[in-house]
Amino acid sequence: MKNLEALINQAKVAYYNGKPFIADEVYDRLLDQHNISETVGTDVSSSDNRYPHAFQMYSLQKVYAGDSHPNYEGEAVIVTPKLDGAAVSLQYIRGKLNMALTRGDGKYGIDITEKIKHLVPCELWTDEAESTKIMQITGEVVAPLSIENARNYAAGALNLKDIEEFKQRDLYFIAYGVQPYPTNNFVEDMHLLSEWGFETAIDSYFVEFPKDGDVWRVIDNAYFEKLGYTSHHPRGAFAKKKRQEGVVTTLLDVTWQVGKSGCVSPVGILEPIKIGDATVSRVSLHNVAIIEALGLEIGCQVEVIRAGEIIPQVVARVD
């Protein structure tokens, strides 16, 4: 179990740094199958160039289609797209952009102010902003679907050292939260952000950007806060996702390949199967920890998906 927790932690850090090595579906299923909390992680507060968010950036509880979801007792709820890019926080002091941070572990993030100031308003010319000493606006940095691996392209841009290279990237910031709440109503909060020059999650379904499901959120901010939080999720919102249906086949063999970086990784040889419009006979198994976590053996039955409808991934052993 310790090896699996180390793997989950490594995958989590890689995801937030824009260099994921396993698909979201695999990550989620490993958590579910082994009953591991998403709180598994490393305290990064002492790391270089990391600073605390003014307000913690919580993750969202995941609910898959067909599963029961939280009951908000008749309260009005809004559904917005769950954009798949890189979550960041913007800190404004008296209406001026003071600091931008990557999500990090939700409590501490990396300073990316010099990059983000090219995507968002640097000043909020409003009476509301002037009267608020500190305001945190959260949102997603995204890239168009027309770009290959758009999510990695957007998240990886935040790690660039060359500001000019960052400015050349086709990137957008979509806001989905603000604290402290300027109004009592989430929709009104988003309208206010629009007036301040932001695109927000309620403006469109954003078909041009990658998405990872929908976000359901209570509209009334007071009720949202009354519901409270777990150690890592707000209770007043959740992410509804569609679990991709896999195809079952046989794991015939495991070979090893050397990547461009010199790293050696296992490759599963499968009895050929059709997934969508593609025939799949090989699949990366990433590392030995994944093989152990999924309990894979030569000759066993495995469930395979195409993550993002592109990359073949083994998500489970089927007994």
Image: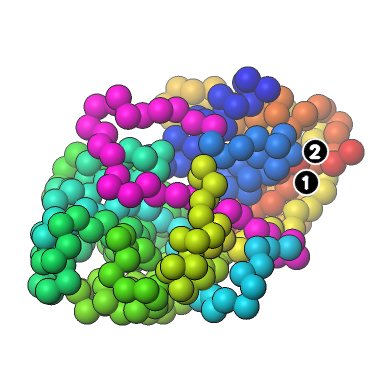
Question: How many labels, in total?
Answer: 2
Contact check, label 2 and label 1, Cβ < 8 Å: yes
Q: In this image, 245 relative to 115: left or right? A: right
Q: In this view, does 171 lie above or below 89?
A: below
Identify the amino acid type marked 1: Glu
* Location of residue 257 in the rendering, given as x and y in whole percent from the top left corner: 58, 27
Front-lying residue, 44 or 254: 44
Q: Give the range drawn in magenta.
A: 40-67
Task: Give the residue furthest to the top.
Answer: 2
| In the depicted structure, whether residue 230 falls above or below residue 6 | below
The residue at the point 21 percent across, 61 percent down is: 119
Q: Main secondary structure of the magenta part?
A: loop
Residue appearing at x 18%, y 48% in the figure = 99
Q: Which colour scheme is used?
A: rainbow
Q: Whole-percent x and y of residue 188? A: 34, 79
Residue 59 coordinates in the image, percent (x, y) = 49, 50
What numbered label is drawn on residue 192? none
Q: Which one is in front, 12 or 285? A: 12
Q: In which quarter of the image is residue 242?
A: bottom right
Helix, strand or loop for disc 2: strand
Could you say whether the residue bearing mark 1 is in a helix, strand or loop? strand
Q: Please determine whether, in this image, residue 279 is positioned above or below residue 271.
A: below
Q: Residue at x 31, y 60 (%)?
A: 179
Residue at 12% across / 74% down in the picture? 127
Residue 23 at x, y percent in the picture = 58, 45
Residue 136 visible in the shown view: yes
Residue designated by label 1: 303
Q: Does the magenta stretch include residue 62?
A: yes
Sort mark 2 into few (<14), some (14-19) or many (20+) by Cα contacts within 10 Å.
many
Q: Which amino acid does label 2 sit on?
A: Arg
Q: Mark 2 points at which residue?
A: 317
Using a 10 Å C-alpha cutoff, classify the residue at mark 1 as few (fewer than 14 neighbours), some (14 to 19) or many (20 or more): some
